[in-house]
Image (cartoon, rainbow, N blue to C red):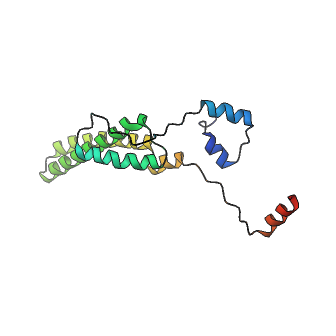
């Protein structure tokens, strides 16, 4: 079974597949590219000030990488909310452990695990994890050294 369809930029950068101008035009016409033109405001339901500030900080960075759009705002906000709840559940679990309340610690660790899974799923969707960034990165073409005598000879011969 073939892998997922790759964007044209990735295909061109890899240099392994040669597409005709017609194929490039057809694919670029149907390829979705969503990048925000300017700052994306946090969703109105994200009410904590510290989470709104963190949203703006991460949103700016993702826009610089050209991988963030208005459509991604809710996912980023959900990531921040889940991470915040994870931290709160972690504090509760630690408190229960200090008090030697095993049942409460077990319950809070399950809550903590749920929020961790939610945050990780959102982070993966947004490219906030190492593996998800690797999937989003377009490889760069290697630069040819201009001082290579063989390349200079071929260029001179072609001219």
Up the image or down, 31 lies above or below 50; here it is above
Looking at the image, which residue sits at the far left? 99
How far across and down, in percent of the image, does residue 23 sit?
71, 33
Residue 86 visible here: no
* Drawn side of residue 92 relative to residue 43, left or right: left
Viewer can see residue 150: yes
The residue lying toward the viewer, choosing from 70 and 123, is 70
Q: Position of residue 54 (x, y in %)?
A: 31, 48
Image quadrant holding the N terminus, namely top right
Quadrant of the rendered image containing residue 155 = bottom right
Q: Which residue lies at the image location 36% right of the left edge and 40% below the top edge?
A: 76
Q: Quadrant of residue 17?
A: top right
Give percent across and percent down for residue 97: 17, 51
Please state the total of marks drawn on the protein image.
Answer: 0
Residue lying at the far right of the rendered structure: 157
Point out the image quarter for the C terminus: bottom right
Q: Residue at x 60, y 51 (%)?
A: 139
Q: Is residue 52 left or right of residue 144?
A: left
Above or below residue 17? Residue 144 is below
Q: In the rendered view, does 106 fall on the left or right side of 71?
A: left
Please state if 43 lies on the left or on the right of 3 as rendered.
left
Closer to the camera in the image, 97 or 153: 153
Q: Residue at x 35, y 49 (%)?
A: 57
Residue occupying the point 61% across, 54% down: 140
Considering depth in this image, is 150 or 94 the residue closer to the camera?
150
């Amino acid at each position: 079974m073939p892998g997922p369809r790759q964007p044209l930029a990735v295909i061109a950068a890899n240099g392994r597949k040669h597409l005709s101008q017609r194929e490039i035009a057809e694919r670029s016409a149907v390829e979705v590219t969503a990048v925000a033109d300017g700052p994306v405001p946090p969703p109105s339901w994200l009410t904590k000030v510290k989470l709104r500030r963190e949203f703006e900080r991460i949103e700016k960075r993702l826009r610089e990488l050209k991988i963030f759009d208005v459509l991604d705002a809710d996912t980023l906000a959900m990531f921040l909310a889940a991470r915040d709840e994870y931290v709160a559940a972690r504090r509760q679990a630690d408190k229960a452990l200090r008090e030697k309340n095993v049942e409460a610690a077990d319950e809070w660790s399950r809550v903590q695990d749920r929020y961790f899974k939610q945050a990780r799923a959102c982070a993966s969707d947004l490219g906030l994890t190492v593996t998800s960034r690797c999937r989003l990165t377009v490889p760069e073409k290697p630069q040819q050294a201009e001082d290579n005598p063989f390349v200079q000879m071929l260029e001179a011969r072609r001219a």
